[in-house]
Image (spheres, helix red, strand yellow):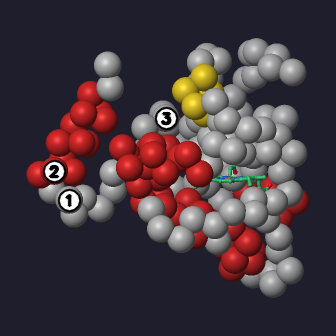
């Protein structure tokens, strides 16, 4: 059913020093689901979570602050409009300290994040996990296609 997890479990025994580990990321995601869910484009719930934060399905390769109908803070929107796309580096820095990340990224000491959560460790695993739900590999997101919203989920 979930070959990824089985493989990763084996890998943990065999090679504990893997830098990125989607299975670990999946566990770590427990910290995120108070505020985030993962719901596929076709409406399948992969992780049931809170609604304080946007759906993270496909977030890797997505322009920051663009999940439809989510009310982002203005600084995250500004960062997205200025070209911020969630690739590996950006996502990991963001998770460590969202506010600092935005301040740095926007060169604005007053920038704020609506995400009041920091992940000091394991961002690379979370990235590996989230990347499994993304069509576009992080590297060079081939532009946002402005995904049509088919379903009206409220
Ligand atoms: C306390 C609630 C909360 C928790 C816990 C939380 N987040 Fe968030 N997250 C938010 C909110 C709110 C936003 C929107 C931020 C904004 O608008 O400035 C957000 C935004 C994001 C974004 C940007 C999404 C986009 O569409 O641009 C990512 C990526 C993200 N969170 C990942 C995570 C991950 C991974 C975790 C767990 C390690 C996590 N978050 C934990 C509330 C949370």
Q: Which mark is residue 13?
A: 2
Q: Identify the residue at image location x=33%, y=56%.
A: 20
> 153 or 65, which lies in front?
153
Structural crowding at the residue carrying mark 2, measured as other residues with C-alpha within 10 Å and reported as few (<14), some (14–19) or many (≥20): few
- Check the image and name the residue furthest to the bottom: 109
**Label 3 element class:** loop
Q: Which residue is mark 1?
A: 16
Quadrant placement of the N terminus = top left
Structural crowding at the residue carrying mark 1, measured as other residues with C-alpha within 10 Å and reported as few (<14), some (14–19) or many (≥20): few
**Label 2 element class:** helix
Q: Identify the residue at image location x=73%, y=38%.
A: 50
Q: Are marks 3 and 2 in contact (CB under 8 Å)?
A: no
On screen, 105 above or below 60? below
Determine whether the beta carbon of the residue marked 3 sits less than 8 angstroms from the nearest atom of ligand 1: no
- The spot of residue 15 in percent (x, y) is 15, 56
Q: Which residue is mark 3?
A: 133
Q: Identify the residue at image location x=87%, y=45%.
A: 71
């Amino acid at each position: 059913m979930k070959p990824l997890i089985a493989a990763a479990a084996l890998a943990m025994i065999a090679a504990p020093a893997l830098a990125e580990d989607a299975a670990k990321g999946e566990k770590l995601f427990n910290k995120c689901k108070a505020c985030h869910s993962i719901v596929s484009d076709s409406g399948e719930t992969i992780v049931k979570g809170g609604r304080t934060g946007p759906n993270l399905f496909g977030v890797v390769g997505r322009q920051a602050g663009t999940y439809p109908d989510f009310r982002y803070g203005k600084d995250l929107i500004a960062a997205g409009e200025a070209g911020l796309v969630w690739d590996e580096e950006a996502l990991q820095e963001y998770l460590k300290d969202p506010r600092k990340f935005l301040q740095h990224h926007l060169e604005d000491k007053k920038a704020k994040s609506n995400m009041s959560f920091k992940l000091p460790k394991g961002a690379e695993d979370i990235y590996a996990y989230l990347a499994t739900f993304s069509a576009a590999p992080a590297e060079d997101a081939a532009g946002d296609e402005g995904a049509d919203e088919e379903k009206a989920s409220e």
